[in-house]
Image (cartoon, rainbow, N blue to C red):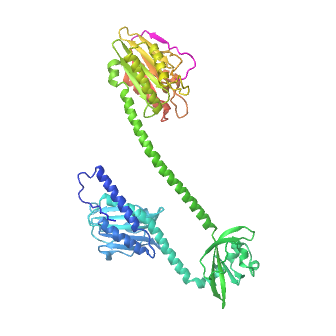
Amino acid sequence: MKLHPKTNGQPDKGRENNASALEERRYVTDAMRHFRNVMLWEDEQTVGSWADKLLSELLPFVEGAMATMYGFYKEKLRLLAIFGAETDQVRPTYDSSEGLLGKVFLHRQPLFLTRTQHERLTLPFGTGFLKSEALLLLPLSYNSRSIGVLEIVFFKEPSEEVVFLLEKIAREAGGHLNALLKELALRESMQKTKENEERLKVLAKAATEGIIFLEGRQISDANDAFLKMFGYVLQEVIGEDYARFLVADSCQSLFELDSQTIPKECVGRYANGTNFPIEVQMRNLFYQKRTYRVLTVRDITEKKLAEETLKDSREKLAEAQKIVELSKEIEKKNRKITDSINYAYKIQNAILPKEADFARILPQSFVYYQCKDIVSGDFYWLSENENHIHLAAVDCTGHGVPGAFMSFIGHSLLNTLINVRQISEPAQILTRLDNKVIKTLRQDEDTSIRDGMDLGLICIDKKTQKITFAGAHRPLWLVRKGKLEEYRGTRAPIGGVYSKPKTFQQVEIEPQKGDMLFLFSDGATDLFNPKGEKFKTKRLRQLLVEVANLPQNQQVETIKTAFQDWSQGVEFIDDVIILGLRL
């Protein structure tokens, strides 16, 4: 595999473009793939040879001057490997709380020093007093436990990508080093055990492992650990066949095996008849001028419990990994769906009347519009021709995407009825709209499709200034001289499955100067506060009476503030429209 180091030269002019970003990701990915292979443990490999191999490949790759790796072993940071210039300055051991190395080791935080921070990097660290442009100290840790420190000196300051790569390598090297140091400790322990084996055999009765001495198959002696482990006294085991204390078939052919057998797991039988897992090993021992066969027994109940726990953890980890992969796939699909919905929002927003339309046609009006989701099932409609102005607040079944589909249908049908067919009477418009929705959704054929819409519609005669109102499940509120009058709409929806005949009524209103008209959706009364209480119609009445005499911009801000103070962060459960018009 051929890798190309990342230098700290002058960046290209297009460094921040997408191609450069992709190149940087590939640089890190390819480098990590290579160094993971370098860090793999090989047979007969020592900790030092492993670290030396890693540094000998790593240092040239990152264009460093010297690289040193320390491992924490026997209360000291001990030199594992070094590669580069002036290696004779490196100390073989280092106190784990001393200097910069100790700081990085104790706090498990990387340390990066440059000449711009220090006139000359001559602070006491592992590499002594080597002149350099930059020093990078990286903690080597595993499971939140410090294992060692990787120290790299540079004659020129490394790039951010190189530092990022080295931090990733250090994180993975910590896990490898932890395993290797444990292996080293285990080897030393085993060697020490081997050297003292004969002495420990003589002192068997003081051992923590269970030990029995055999003549043939009969027990001639046993230590206290064995007796305690199996629940007997010495007199009860002397002369007994050792197989009595083992579950049949679990340790078959143990006695017939070579005297120096490897440890074998089987099942022991306690004095009360209960079973427990044990590990046994047969050895020869010369004791009191005679050769005995010695069987050592170790209770591995806790080991088995740990193995079961580990197995369960691995299974849970595998399940968690599946969940993570599934979550990523769901996130990808959700992103696509959200992108589509955002585009639908642009379309829906484009068909709504603009502020300029309201300013030109109804200059003393305002719109409060709050969607529950990205797209809305509520919409408002404004149209003007030579003789009339029509204004509607429409609440379609549902919210979000389903509601948005209904809003497109409602907008299209209102446009056809009012602007194309020139129907001006609100009651007639609602009657035609009801028929069109039923036919469009084929509700006369399939009663399972119950979608529809509620709306309030007013028509202003430009010559007489008279106002005609008709509503489908929605009212018109008029605030006059501080008092609110309600004009109820017909108690029937537009579309949907409705058992009774629908007859939409309209009412004519003689306006007076200063009158304030309000059309709104039911979402305005369905706001919840943290106590689970609804805003309800009574509070909305009081609010609209209070804002009726305010300028339009203050009306919107007052309504917005009132809703925020009431909900206190509780999410809206429906879309909200409030249209206000001063006459």
Whether residue 207 is situated above or below residue 18 in the rendered picture = below
Image point (40%, 33%), residue name: 344
Q: Nearer the viewer, residue 116 or 372?
A: 372
In the picture, residue 139 is in which quadrant?
bottom left
- Residue 162 belongs to the span the image colors magenta: no
Q: Nearer the viewer, residue 213 or 138?
A: 213
Name the spot of residue 220 as percent of width and height, x first.
72, 83
Image point (68%, 82%), residue name: 213
In the picture, residue 23 is in which quadrant?
bottom left
Whether residue 137 is situated above or below residue 257 in the rendered picture = above
Residue lying at the far bottom in this picture: please name it: 289
- Residue 497 belongs to the span the image colors magenta: yes
Over which residues does the magenta segment extend? 496-513
Question: Does residue 344 appear left or right of residue 473 in this picture?
Answer: left
Q: Is residue 514 visible?
A: no
Q: Main secondary structure of the magenta part?
A: loop
Image point (66%, 77%), residue name: 253
Question: Does residue 395 appear left or right of residue 158 in this picture?
Answer: right
In the picture, the quarter occupied by the C terminus is top left
Residue lying at the far right in this picture: please name it: 236
Name the spot of residue 519 as percent of width and height, x first.
45, 20
